[in-house]
Amino acid sequence: GWLKANKPDMFNEFDKRIGDRATEIEMEFSDLAKPYPGTIELLEDLRTMGYKTAILTRGGHSYADHILSRFDMLGLFDAMVARDDYPYLEAKPAKISMEHMCGKIGVDCEEVLFVGDGTTDYYTCVNSGSRFVGVETHMDREQWVKIAGPSVVTVPLVADIRRFVE
């Protein structure tokens, strides 16, 4: 936006400062984070079936590492792309964020079944051509339909993703 156009020399510094502060806030509240019910078991099953699993998050990398480590989940993922792994403009919902993740696991965006719980997740899939399943943790089916239309696929629980892969 404006800062990059008018003060390009300051953009990278501001980007880093904002990202660092966001990570500080995430870490401050990290004790509130926990996996949704059934998530760990689903990930273990997906990996047993040979699926690749990855995380694409607008959270900071150190925050995501902290949470995943706390729940012994780091080994359940082949790759992770976080907000601060690339320049700010390459974070979700930018198409390139999905391309970065796909590059790390060796698949095309169109092969991805992305499970998300927010509008940024949905728009990341729209921008990248990935398939999307919305989890009704923060928004119910009706809210998802208002945002994404009646054809949006949603599930009440993360564990319900099983029906798409079995």
Image (spheres, rainbow, N blue to C red):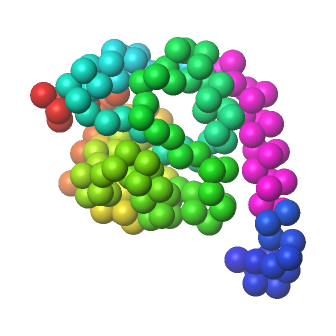
Q: Which residue is drawn at 32% across and 57% down?
A: 109
As displayed, is residue 142 above or below residue 70? below
Q: Which of the 4 quarters of the picture holds residue 40?
A: top left
State the residue in front, 93 or 105: 105
Where is residue 134 drawn, in percent x and y? 34, 42
As displayed, is residue 14 above or below residue 160? below
Where is residue 95 drawn, in percent x and y? 44, 64
Where is residue 116 drawn, in percent x and y? 41, 41
As displayed, is residue 108 above or below residue 58? below
As displayed, is residue 64 above or below residue 45? below
Q: Does the magenta stretch include residue 21?
A: yes
Q: Is residue 93 left or right of residue 156?
A: right
Where is residue 89 drawn, in percent x and y? 62, 66
Q: Which of the 4 quarters of the picture holds residue 23?
A: top right
State the residue in front, 66 or 26: 66
Q: Is residue 164 magenta?
A: no
Q: Is residue 157 visible from the viewing direction of this image?
A: no
Q: Is residue 58 left or right of residue 35?
A: right
Q: Is residue 36 visible from the viewing direction of this image?
A: yes
Q: Please tell me whether the stretch drawn in magenta is mainly helix, strand or loop.
A: helix
State the residue in front, 136 or 164: 164
Residue span colored magenta: 14-33
Q: Residue at x 57, y 63 (%)?
A: 90
Q: Which residue is drawn at 76% across and 77% down?
A: 4
Q: Quadrant of the C terminus?
A: top left
Q: Which residue is drawn at 84% across and 54% down?
A: 17
Q: Quadrant of the N terminus?
A: bottom right
